[in-house]
Each structure stands twice: as structure tokens, then as C-alpha cells.
Image: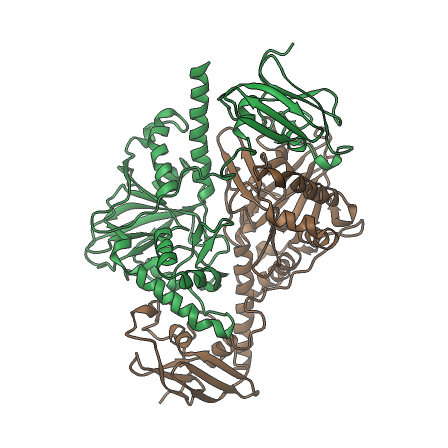
Chain colours: A green, B brown
Amino acid sequence: MTTSLPLSPDYDAWPIEADLEAVSFTSRLLTVRWSDGRESRYHGIWLRENAADETTVNPATRERILDLSTLPGWPEITGAEIDEAGALCVNFVTDVGYLRFHPGWLRAHDYDNAGDPEPPLVPVTLWYGGTEASPDSLDASDLFDTEPFCEAEEAILAPALMSVLSKGIVRLRGLPTEPDSLKAIAQRIGPIRPTNFGLLFDVKAKPDPDSNAYTSIALPPHTDLPTREYHPGLQILHCLENSVEGGEAVMLDGFAVAEALRERDPKAFTTLTRVRWCYANTARTTDYVWYSPMIRLDHRGELLEVRIADFLRGPLQIPFDEVESAYEALMTLQRMLREPGFAIRFTYEPGDAVIFDNRRLLHARDAFEGTSGHRWLQGCYMERDEIRSRYRMVQRARRRRRLTTEV
Amino acid sequence: MTTSLPLSPDYDAWPIEADLEAVSFTSRLLTVRWSDGRESRYHGIWLRENAADETTVNPATRERILDLSTLPGWPEITGAEIDEAGALCVNFVTDVGYLRFHPGWLRAHDYDNAGDPEPPLVPVTLWYGGTEASPDSLDASDLFDTEPFCEAEEAILAPALMSVLSKGIVRLRGLPTEPDSLKAIAQRIGPIRPTNFGLLFDVKAKPDPDSNAYTSIALPPHTDLPTREYHPGLQILHCLENSVEGGEAVMLDGFAVAEALRERDPKAFTTLTRVRWCYANTARTTDYVWYSPMIRLDHRGELLEVRIADFLRGPLQIPFDEVESAYEALMTLQRMLREPGFAIRFTYEPGDAVIFDNRRLLHARDAFEGTSGHRWLQGCYMERDEIRSRYRMVQRARRRRRLTTEV
């Protein structure tokens, strides 16, 4: 007699929002009714592939070991019932015995009733600038007094991760100002992605610069490393010293600018989603080149990323007749990037770490007076994947706590 | 009087294939005739943006400082001539004085006559397997006796880079077998991309595995880390020890498989370019999820990348009516992946480092007998960008030598 619920195929905990009440099936399709009246259909083949038993999932790694195409035939359903523990039990012609499905997991993966099959972890919120605006700022001075993955760390990280996922930016304050402490800050989220500029890079005026970033000149709004096929999804800039005059940080929501362009000048917007600009960073020992539209949309037509950096564009190489309209669209965008209504401006204080989505936000810098003091930021890159993984861990911990409280 | 050619906007050297012989212009368009009879048209605005003078390019970094939209108007051409050094000189209404263009650079960026505006560095060559096939293998035992960026290093690296760019794989032989020497091997190409599995990862059976890779079970053909929005473009596996029975390496050209699928079953191919599968790697402290088609095409309909790993797929979440055809296409692909005609099989020898395109090649492994000896590979990830940058440096060095020989 079965008395407990089966494992889910993953490491996660799945609270039970509703109980299974009834099940019916045909050879390829199974329908369940839940205690709140909802009906959900599942394909037999989908169920077979997502079973959690040891013929399907390696119990040590929770990774799938089943190759569907090695089954002797289509896994047709020959029986189904709800057992005493509340699990869905299904028998397939290709298997001996029932496979059991956790009702909380089944409900969470109810693709038959899913609105958005790929819901964002946190909805995207566009933002605008102006003189009063500043990035979400959070006190993180206790971060290093917490253990990784404990609730106290979560209390600091969770709102920071949410700001980055929704607005593309957060400012953590009160962090250490020792050189290289950015490594430990970043590692609370995930691995750093090194580039030819190093694991960490120092943003300060330096002799023999290999990038305009390492001078004291103003930088126009841009994303970093657009010259890569895969340009980094996250950037962290950590302020160690700032006593110069000028050198204010300027940030724009590139998605807000792009949506405003779509509204005001749809033709220019479409041009910038199509024209493949050349991005090039030719230095003494490296030579990065990539071709891409400035604005990329996902399969739903929503903004996926922007790739903007005038100082890293190489010579445009597109069909002759498309050149003038490409430049017209570019100049429309360039003019918008100078509108004060999009930009927030702030001054880095020592101990600030600004985490931002490098494929959404544009950052810029006023010129600063190199002799008026010291300005030293350390920076690093990561991927959006890391922030999403970390945020999912927060969600998983909350589900687990909720489940523990319920039981 | 001008006697020497101007700088190019970048660090590169541009041999002069043909001399400028004649120039004519309208306010927005300039036409040159070359000594070999070719005619090339350039837009005035394109020329203005790509000038190499100090109002356009920061001389210290060779990066652009001009923002076109800040010019008082469209940069119309008011004069053009070829000077005594052979440079094209153009005067714009918005500037005082002539801007000079290097004829070798102009010719190399002749978008008016370009066939493919984004030519591949090395053409892609599809390959098939069979019992006789093995990866291109190169003796690299002298690699660490050479200085980075010298001609002796280039003699080893250039053919390796070419194999990776054309076939997606190369095997370097005779390298050191000290643990962690992969770091130094990789750094001859570019920076390593660390993941939650570390800067280097050890592929050997280990207790409490967090991936099927770290067991001794067989692994089906797959790409690594498909659970990332940006999954790594390159992987290096470096063999330190291999005395086990079994555990042969198996590699397939995922592009060859995909093209065969396009030919044999166009409907299944199209389905796999459209259906967004869920890739998920749920471990104890990380939770990576991404949605993507298994086959991605570029803007020309050519293969950009494949993303295949049955053991890292989460539950499919797509509209109900598309589920069965998605699984039919998947199983067609799975059956092809088992055809011996696609696979090359080889045994890693200590000192081998196999560099392969992780978004093109599929790698697999036979089960091995964990108690029959030791099998230890170290691996790391990089981006395709690094191999392309390194190969462009080879091309640049060759252009420079050619130029030096000519002069």
C-alpha cells in the first residue's frame, strides 16, 4: 500500500494547491479534475517522459536517463488512477507497473491551462529618468555577516535580485571598499565571466588605454562588449574611491528608450531591429567583431536586448540601398539618448555596487577632471542566467518553507 | 604637402591591392575608380562616420568619439580628390578641411561590391562519422616553448583555429598532463568562462554527483549547459589519465545531423526550429532554466546553433495542440543521433586536448567501468568570440608581414 507522495523529478518542493479528484484517459491523453474544479489534460507521451521513477530519472542527479525513441512504441496509456496518497498513477503499454506523479508538481506544470508558457520570473517595469530619479538603493552592509543561502542573506539579496529582474538595476550600499572585494560580492550571486579585460577590470584613467572607458573623457550611453556574439547580460560596478569633480554616472533604461522609439517612429524602430551593424573592438592583441541589430526582439516581439555603443561600431557593411535609412534611424536613436527625460544621474559613493543588466541598460559617464581627486571603480561581468538561478533558489526556499509550515 | 598615407581607423594594416585613380561626387554620394577598373560607391555619411582623424577617433584607443547626430546637419560632400600619397580626401560641409581615407582600408570595406557582407572567417565544412573517421589531430608538444603571438606559436595555433572554425573540432596532442595545465592551454586562445561547475571542471566519476557527467553511465549526444540563455560556444576537454575499459569519446557534427534532418524530414526540422523546449538544471544550490528551439537559424536561414541534451530538458510547456508533433520531431532526431554514420569515436590519450564548438558539436560517452582504472578529464568553457578574435590576430599578423614584404 502506498502511503507517501512520490518524489518530483527535480529537487524542488511542490506545495499542493488542490487535490486530484478524478482521472480519465484515452490511449494518448489523460484528463484530471482538481478539487477546485479545474480540468487539466496531459499527453501520455509528456507524462511518460516526465515520470520521476528510476527508469526515467537518475536518482543521484535528478537528470533524465530515458531516451523516448528507444521505447518499443508510442507509450500508450493502459490505466490510470489516483492512489491513497493523492498521487496520479499511470500505466503505459511500454512499462511494467504504474508510474506515479506528484500532484503539486503536475499542477505547477499544467501546460493545458497555462497563460504564458514562459512567464518572466519578475515582470519587466520600464522606467524613466529626470532630476529626481535614482536607482533602487538597498543597504547591504550586513551582507558579509550572513551565510550563503540562509534567510538573512535572502533578506538582503531577494529585493536586489527583484530590482535587477524588473528594472534592470539596483544599487547596493555600505559594502567594503577593499580592492577585489567585488569578487566576494559577485560570488553571492554566481560566477564572474572574465573577458580580455580580466576577471575584474579597473575603471580609472590609466596610461596607454585600450578602451575609451579607461580615459577621463565622457562616454555616450552604451552597453559593454557589444563586439561579442554573446555580450554579457550583467555588469557590476563597485566604487572604491570617488573624490573627483564630475564623472557622474548616467544610466538609461534602454528598453524604455526602445519602446518610446517604437511608439514615436515605428519605421526607425523596425530598421534598428533589422539592420545588422558591425561592432568591432580592435586592440593590440585582440580583435572582436560581431554583427547584430541594435534592438533584438524575442519570439513574441518583446524586447530581448539592445546593443548600442557608437565607439565600438566598425564600418557598416550592408546592402548599398539600405545605408541612408540605417543612418537616419541611428541618428533618431542618438538624439533620444541625449534627452534628459530618460537618464538618471547619480554619484558613486565608496562602498556602492551597482548591478545592472548590460543588455538592457545603457550607461554613460560625464567627463571628469583626472587631477581633481581619485575615481576608482572595479567592474565585472556575469550572465543574466546567474541572477535568475539565484532568484529561483529564493523562490524554492520560500516554497519549501511554505510546505514545511503547511505540514 | 601630404606625403604619407593616413592611419586607418583601427590598429590594422591594410595592404593596397589597387590604387585610387579617379573620384567624383554628389552631395551625398562619392564614387571612386580603382586602377583595376573596379568602381566603388560610398555614402557621404558613411565616410564621415568612418574617418580616422582626431575629431572622429580617439587617437589613444582608436575608438570612435563622433556622435553623428550632434553634427549641425547631414554631412554633405563639398569636395573630393586623390592626394599625392594616394589617399582619398573628402571635404564635408560640416567640417573645416579635408578628411583623408587610406585606400587599402577603403577597398577592404567596399560594401558596394561586397558579396557576403558578413563572410565567415573560415567556411563551415560539415562532416560525417564512420569507423575510419577521427578529428583533425595536431602535434602541440612545442606549444609551451613558444612565446604568445610569435610566428612559432602561430604555426601551431593557426591550423587548430581553422579546424575549430570549419569543422567545429580539433585534437591537440602531446600537451602536459599536470592537473590544471588546461588553464595555460586555454589562455593561449583567450579567457576561460567559469560556470557554477568552476573555472575548470573535473570529468570523472565522483561521489554525490550533481550531473550525469560525473557518473560512469553512458551519456547521449548533447551540448553542455543548454540551460543557459547564453550557452558556451566552446569547450576544451583535456585528458590527464585514461586507463579504464570503455568510456570512448563519441562526437557528432550537430550541424551535419541538422542538415540531414532538413533534407529527410523538413517538417520535423521546421518543428525543431520553432518549438521552445524547456532546459532545466535543478541542483541543490543552483536552478538554471531556459527555453529555446533545439535548432536555431541565423537571419539567412543557416545553422547558428543546436541545443540538445535530453537529460537537461525540463517539462515541455507549449500550447496543448503542438505537443504531439513536437515529440514526433524529437524522436526523429533522437533516432538520427544513434545512427553510426554521424559519429566519430576515439579514445582520449593523456596529453590530448580536444577543443570543440559546444553549440555545434554533440558529444557523448559510452559507459565505462569505474573500477578498471582511472579516467580523468579536465574541462573548461570559452566563447566562440575568443577563437575568432585569436584567428583574426593571425590574419592581422599575416597582413602586416605581407605589407612589410611589399614595402
Task: Please tell me which residue is depicted at 60% across the width and 12% down the height of the picture.
Answer: A84
User: For the point 67% across and 50% down, which residue is it?
Assistant: B269
Q: Residue furthest top?
A: A1
- For residue B179, side relative to residue A278 (left or right): right
**Count of all numbered marks drawn on residues in the image:** 0
- Residue A316 location, x and y as percent? 46, 69
Q: Which residue is more in the foreground, B246 or B104?
A: B104
Q: Is residue A242 left or right of residue B134?
A: left
Side (left or right) of B26 relative to A320: left
Q: Is residue A14 visible?
A: yes
How far from the left and from the top, in percent, is residue B356? 63, 51
**If the image is split into quadrants, where does the N terminus of chain B sit?**
bottom left
Does B3 appear above or below A292?
A: below
In the displayed structure image, the side of residue B127 where residue B117 appears, left or right:
left
Please identify the quarter of the rendering in which residue B54 is found: bottom left
Q: Position of residue A222 (x, y in %)?
A: 36, 57
Nearest the camera: A131 or B56? Answer: A131
Residue B241, given in percent of the width and then of the height, sits at 67, 39
B30 in relation to A90, above or below: below
Outermost right residue: B131
- In this view, the residue in front, A168 or B367, is A168
- Residue B253 seen in render: no
Most distant residue in the front direction: A37
